[in-house]
Each structure stands twice: as C-alpha cells, then as structure tokens.
Image: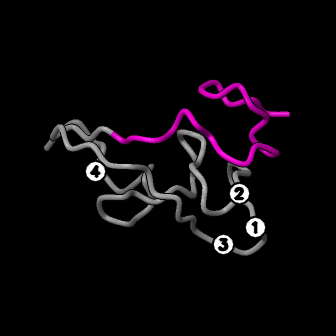
Amino acid sequence: MAMCKWCNQDMKTADNCPANTIIKYPDDTQMMVSTQHFNEDDGRCYDCGIKHGYNHHPGCDAERCPKCGDQLISCGCLDDEI
C-alpha cells in the first residue's frame, strides 16, 4: 500500500486526490490541474491509480500539464528558470 503524503489515501484505490487541484507556475500563473492521463486504458491511472477524469496524486508520471498538454513532470513549465 502506497499512501499519498498530501491526501493520506491509498494511491492505488483512491478515486481522487483532493490535495492536487491548482498548479502554480514560476511565472505566477495558476491553473486547475488536468484530469487527462497518458495511456488511458483500464479506468485508472497506470502510475498513481486515480480514476480517469479525477485529479492525480502530486508527482504522478501520467499527469498532463494544463499549460502545454505534455507530461507535467518533464515538460519544463514548472522549472524555476523562465
């Protein structure tokens, strides 16, 4: 069992992570998190286990960036250098 340190739920069985709702970018832009996932195939996110259409647990590999649409953890939008 892997517990989310933000919402204190089991990451593989929780339907939604209520702690992950707003993304704050270095340029002071704030956006609602994207509920779209990469590899939508079985109704749950392959990385954090959240149901498709709900907020990922922070740091999830499959979360899309609401700003550019790419993978959030590697798109560069959250980098400190603007």
- Furthest toward the bottom, the residue is 41
Judge from the rendering whether residue 79 lies leftward or rightward of residue 20; answer left or right.
left
In whole angstroms, how far apart are the C-alphas of marks 2 and 4?
Answer: 25 Å
Q: Which residue is mark 1?
A: 43
Q: Are marks 2 and 1 in contact (CB under 8 Å)?
A: yes
Expressed as whole percent of the image width and height from the top left, the position of residue 43 reads 75, 67
Q: Of the residues tagged 3 and 4, which is closer to the observer? A: 3
Marks 2 and 3, Cα distance to the nearest angstrom?
10 Å
For the point 46% across and 60% down, which residue is it?
A: 64
Residue 75 has which mark?
none
| Residue drawn at point x = 58 percent, y = 47 percent | 60
Q: Earlier in the sequence, mark 4 or mark 1?
A: 1
Q: Residues within 10 Å of mark 4 (few under 14, many from 20)?
A: many
Task: Tell me if label 2 and label 3 are in contact, CB under 8 Å.
Answer: no
Q: Secondary structure at mark 4?
A: loop
Magenta range is 1-23
Amino acid residing under circle 1 = Gly
Say which label, 2 or 1, has the lower sequence index: 1
Residue under circle 4?
77
Q: Which residue is mark 2?
A: 51
- Lower position in the chain sequence, tag 2 or tag 4: 2
Residue at point 57%, 64% (across, down): 37
Expressed as whole percent of the image width and height from the top left, the position of residue 54 reads 60, 54
